[in-house]
């Protein structure tokens, strides 16, 4: 039972990273109906930029980690703006259904190659700002950084939700998500709202990168797998539901850790993918998603 609980805690930490990335997918889909398929690379670049900053900021591991986070979030936001301007906006203007898909994939490959040329192809170790000594929870060993990942992931998603509900700019995002044409007629600059949603999406992914980096190896290839699994989480939970992202992330994270231990690490991705296929067959809009109704 202690081993099982330890696997569950590890799965929750991993699942919350998936949830944050999936949350970013939802932000762009809500306002523009498009997705950034380079979301995993936003996480990867956030982790690598954070690693470089930690080595230059003085004040100890904990303080340098805290001071690095706002810079990484700002960097992620700028990257999101760049992706929207270069890869998404032209496709939206010409109403290309597949232009933004290929453009964001192409940019993801470019970001990966840039990272390999700057930081190299080898995986690097990200110094943990917290003690590596685990503590006991119901008899299971839990690392302090795992708790930090869970708290940090929930905090960033809650902050975005509060921003959307309480601020005038957030309400513009909500209005655009509900009806982009009506929002434009009411004077809202929907183009700027879409750009902002991409900035916010990449910023949350970059933040997720510096959260997960101390628990794993950091490198140019870390984003592809995480981004793909987070996309599966977004589909399982529903592209219109924040709660769905969290639930889907937890399901996939716990399924991976338990399957990897009790069956084989070679099969740890199988349960999540089987669940994805099942959800698509039974409820294509996701567990918590709402089916879109279009008048013909």
Image (cartoon, rainbow, N blue to C red):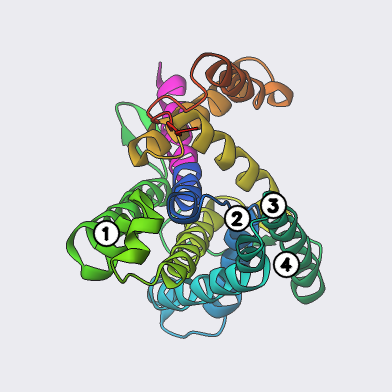
Q: Which of the 4 quarters of the picture holds residue 269?
A: top right
Identify which residue is drawn at 42% across, 24% down: 287
Instruction: Give whichever of discs 1 and 4 has the lower sequence position.
Output: 4
Q: Which residue is mark 4?
A: 111
Q: Is residue 283 magenta?
A: no
Instruction: Give whichever of discs 1 and 2 has the lower sequence position.
Output: 2
Label placed on residue 63 = none
What distance separates the C-alpha of mark 4 from that of mark 3? 16 Å
Residues 278 and 295: in front is 295
Quick check: 230 above or below 103? above
Position of 222 with respect to 16 (left or right) is right
Residue 127 place in picture, x, y as percent: 54, 64
As helix, strand or loop, the secondary structure at mark 2 comes to loop
Residues 163 and 3: in front is 163
Q: Which residue is mark 1?
A: 164
Label placed on residue 36 = 2
- Could you classify mark 3 by the number of other residues whose Cα lies within 10 Å: few (under 14), some (14-19), or many (20 or more)? some
Label placed on residue 101 = 3
Residue 137 place in picture, x, y as percent: 30, 33
């Amino acid at each position: 039972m202690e081993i099982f609980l330890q696997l569950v805690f590890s799965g929750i930490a991993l699942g919350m990273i998936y949830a944050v990335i999936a949350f970013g997918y939802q932000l762009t889909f809500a306002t523009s109906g498009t997705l950034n398929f380079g979301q995993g690379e936003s996480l990867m670049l956030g982790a690598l930029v954070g690693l470089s900053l930690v080595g230059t900021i003085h004040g100890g591991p904990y303080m340098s980690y805290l001071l690095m986070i706002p810079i990484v979030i700002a960097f992620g936001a700028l990257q999101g703006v760049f992706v929207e301007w270069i890869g998404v906006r032209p496709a939206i203007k010409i109403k290309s259904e597949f232009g933004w898909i290929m453009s964001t994939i192409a940019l993801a490959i470019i970001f990966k190659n840039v990272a390999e040329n700057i930081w190299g192809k080898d995986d690097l170790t990200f110094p943990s700002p917290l003690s590596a000594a685990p503590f006991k929870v119901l008899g299971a060993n839990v690392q302090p950084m795992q708790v930090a990942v869970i708290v940090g992931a929930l905090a960033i998603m809650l902050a975005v939700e509060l921003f959307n509900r309480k601020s005038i700019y957030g309400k513009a995002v909500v209005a655009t998500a509900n009806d982009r044409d009506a929002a434009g007629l009411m004077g809202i600059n929907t183009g700027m709202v879409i750009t902002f949603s991409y900035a916010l999406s990449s910023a949350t992914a970059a933040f997720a990168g510096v959260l997960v980096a101390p628990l794993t190896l950091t490198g140019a290839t870390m984003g592809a797998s995480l981004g793909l699994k987070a996309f599966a989480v977004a589909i399982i939970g529903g592209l219109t539901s924040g709660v769905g992202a969290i639930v889907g992330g937890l399901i996939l994270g716990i399924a991976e850790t338990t399957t990897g231990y009790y069956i084989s690490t070679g099969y740890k991705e199988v349960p999540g993918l089987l669940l994805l296929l099942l959800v698509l067959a039974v409820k294509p809009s996701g567990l918590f998603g709402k089916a879109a109704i279009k008048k013909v």
